[in-house]
């Protein structure tokens, strides 16, 4: 057991060393290393953006903008925080801008434009097997709508803190660092976000 | 702890964000208080429902985004090289450095350095020759063809000169189009080629422009230029000659972004030849995303994915 834990720690350390080498190679203009870095993080960037913005098209925009910023500014990365934190800081800033703009627009269409044509927004949720009970499906659909409404009622910052803590599993201290605020402020955001959602989803949970 | 304090701490307790001492106090209270236990259960139920309704990116989205990113970076890089070289000192340095590259322009570097130097000085003495269009200036690069002294104590020097002019005009001007067609084949500067193809691509109705775009797609060494030329051929993706060239490019081009764009153009008009070329590509394609796009295209065309 102890050996397993030691193995995991040393594997993480090796991964960090490798990542540092990859980042240095990118800083020296190595395109293959850049692609390696993108591949290592792009799924988690997409998941974060998709879940925060609840739109594949917006997630696609965030992806492009975030990795282009990384490409243009990687020479300024000084290893004083992890690359993950640096990247997430970029991604969260872009997502916050999207959320703020959306607060002004407010309305979201019920379908998503994807490369394979329009898709019902609800179909991108992670639920329901192929033989789902129709009553259960209706209930799920209503709950999904209500969750969407509850999330869009949060302020962009509450939404971000909730996403990073609940879905991304980051500690509030790290979230505070990423968003340029204190751990205490992140705690308050998480509390307010949870309370608001419990009010909106009261009948369902 | 009071019920009020516990209610406020429940979300942080659930996420494991309480100080150990507060957590202990909370657990002691929860054991004794059914109401607060119910509140904690509601928190757990909320979290479970949120997990079940998590949004997930469509399966191909990451690969598509990666592909778009590569294209965006190409677009950034090529014009950057071009703009960088528009600074006169960079032009001079680039010209100077190019002398030392084997096989380009000059074969005798030492002599060439002298000639360029002469050219720069000559530019100060040779008057600008007026010509057609809006001529705004002339740098001169010269080489000496011959030196011939005569009996009167004079010397005849034959000088070959290349004048740099700035010519401006509208895109529909024939002369401007001719210059752009020449620029699209400018071997030494991918930046010039990409800018020219970008301008020409909206004029692909002209057969001359279309030929230049086809030539760029098949022969240009720079993938950024090839991608631009493909954009210009979009409205001709139904043309037999264009399709034949695209099929050849699809099987031979070494750049995945180019191959993906060619697939998009070819499948806009479905025919048996396209099915055949896509089936051939599936069998030899190394790039998983290109292969997947190819397989999807074949399925859309109700064709089998492999050849048997």
Image: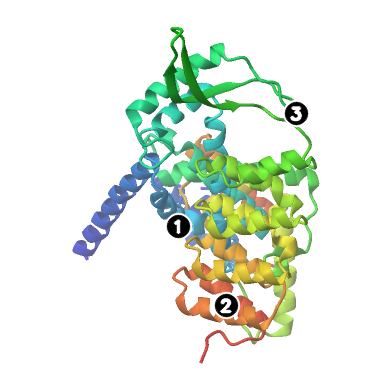
Chain under numbered label 3: B
Density class for disc 1 (Cα within 10 Å; few <14, some 14-19, many ≥20) is some
Tell me the SS state at disc 3: loop
The residues bearing labels 2 and 1 have C-alpha atoms spaced at a distance of 27 Å
Labels 1, 3: one chain: no
Percent coordinates x, y for residue A164 in the rendering: 53, 51
Residue extending furthest toward the left: A3
| For discs 2 and 1, the disc positioned in front in the rendered view | 2
Labels 3, 2: one chain: yes
Chain under numbered label 2: B
Chain under numbered label 1: A
Q: Which residue is nearer to you in this view: A64 or B126? A: B126
Task: Indicate whether A147 appears above or below B281.
Answer: above
User: Seen in the image, is B212 located left or right of residue A81?
Assistant: right
Q: Which residue is nearer to you in this view: B7 or B140? A: B140
Q: Quickly name the residue at label 2.
A: B278
- Tag 2 and tag 1, C-beta contact below 8 Å: no
User: Seen in the image, is B13 located left or right of residue A19?
Assistant: right
Density class for disc 3 (Cα within 10 Å; few <14, some 14-19, many ≥20) is few
Residue extending furthest toward the front: B151
Task: Indicate whether B85 appears above or below B68.
Answer: above
Q: Quickly name the residue at label 3.
A: B133
- Taking the spot 32% from the left edge, 45% from the top edge, the residue there is A20
Q: Which residue is nearer to you in this view: B81 or B110? A: B110
Q: Quickly name the residue at label 1.
A: A39
- Tag 3 and tag 2, C-beta contact below 8 Å: no
Instruction: Decide if residue B97 is in sight here.
Output: yes
Percent coordinates x, y for residue B307 in the rendering: 52, 88
Tell me the SS state at disc 2: helix
- Taking the spot 71% from the left edge, 25% from the top edge, the residue there is B131
């Amino acid at each position: 057991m102890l050996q397993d834990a030691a193995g995991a720690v040393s594997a993480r350390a090796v991964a960090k060393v490798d990542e540092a080498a990859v980042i240095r190679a990118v800083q020296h203009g190595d395109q293959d290393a850049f692609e390696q870095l993108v591949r290592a993080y792009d799924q988690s960037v997409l998941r974060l953006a998709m879940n925060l913005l609840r739109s594949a098209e917006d997630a696609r925009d965030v992806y492009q903008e975030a990795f282009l910023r990384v490409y243009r500014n990687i020479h300024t990365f000084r290893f004083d925080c992890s690359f993950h934190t640096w990247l997430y800081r970029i991604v969260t800033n872009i997502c916050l801008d999207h959320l703020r703009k959306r607060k002004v627009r407010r309305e979201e269409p019920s379908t998503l434009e994807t490369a394979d044509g329009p898709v019902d927004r609800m179909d991108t949720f992670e639920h329901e097997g192929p033989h789902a009970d129709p009553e259960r499906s209706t209930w799920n659909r209503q709950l999904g709508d209500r969750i969407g409404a509850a999330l869009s009622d949060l302020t962009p910052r509450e939404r971000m803190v909730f996403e990073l803590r609940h879905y991304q599993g980051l500690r509030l201290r790290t979230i505070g660092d990423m968003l340029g605020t204190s751990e205490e402020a992140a705690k308050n955001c998480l509390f307010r976000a949870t309370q608001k959602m419990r009010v909106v989803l009261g009948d369902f949970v | 702890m009071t019920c009020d304090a516990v209610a406020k701490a429940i979300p942080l307790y659930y996420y494991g964000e309480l100080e150990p001492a507060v957590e202990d106090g909370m657990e002691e209270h929860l054991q004794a208080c059914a109401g607060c236990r119910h509140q904690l259960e509601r928190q757990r139920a909320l979290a479970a429902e949120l997990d079940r309704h998590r949004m997930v990116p469509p399966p191909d989205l990451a690969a598509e985004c990666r592909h778009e990113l590569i294209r965006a970076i190409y677009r950034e890089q090529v014009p950057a090289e071009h703009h960088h070289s528009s600074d006169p000192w960079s032009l001079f340095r680039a010209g100077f450095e190019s002398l030392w590259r084997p096989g380009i322009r000059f074969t005798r570097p030492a002599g060439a350095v002298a000639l360029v130097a002469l050219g720069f000085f000559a530019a100060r003495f040779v008057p600008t020759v007026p010509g057609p269009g809006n001529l705004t200036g002339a740098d001169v690069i010269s080489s000496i063809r011959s030196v011939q002294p005569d009996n009167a104590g004079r010397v005849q020097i034959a000088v070959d000169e290349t004048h740099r002019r700035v010519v401006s005009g509208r895109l529909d001007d024939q002369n401007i189009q001719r210059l752009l067609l020449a620029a699209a084949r400018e071997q030494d500067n991918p930046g010039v080629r990409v800018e020219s193809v970008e301008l020409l691509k909206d004029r692909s109705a002209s057969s001359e422009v279309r030929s230049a775009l086809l030539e760029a797609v098949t022969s240009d060494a720079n993938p950024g230029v090839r991608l631009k030329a493909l954009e210009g051929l979009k409205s001709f993706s139904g043309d037999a000659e264009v399709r034949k060239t695209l099929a050849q490019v699809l099987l031979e081009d070494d750049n995945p972004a180019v191959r993906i764009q060619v697939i998009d153009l070819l499948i806009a008009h479905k025919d048996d030849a396209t099915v055949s070329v896509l089936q051939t590509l599936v069998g030899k394609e190394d790039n998983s995303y290109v292969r997947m796009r190819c397989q999807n295209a074949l399925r859309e065309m109700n064709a089998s994915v492999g050849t048997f």
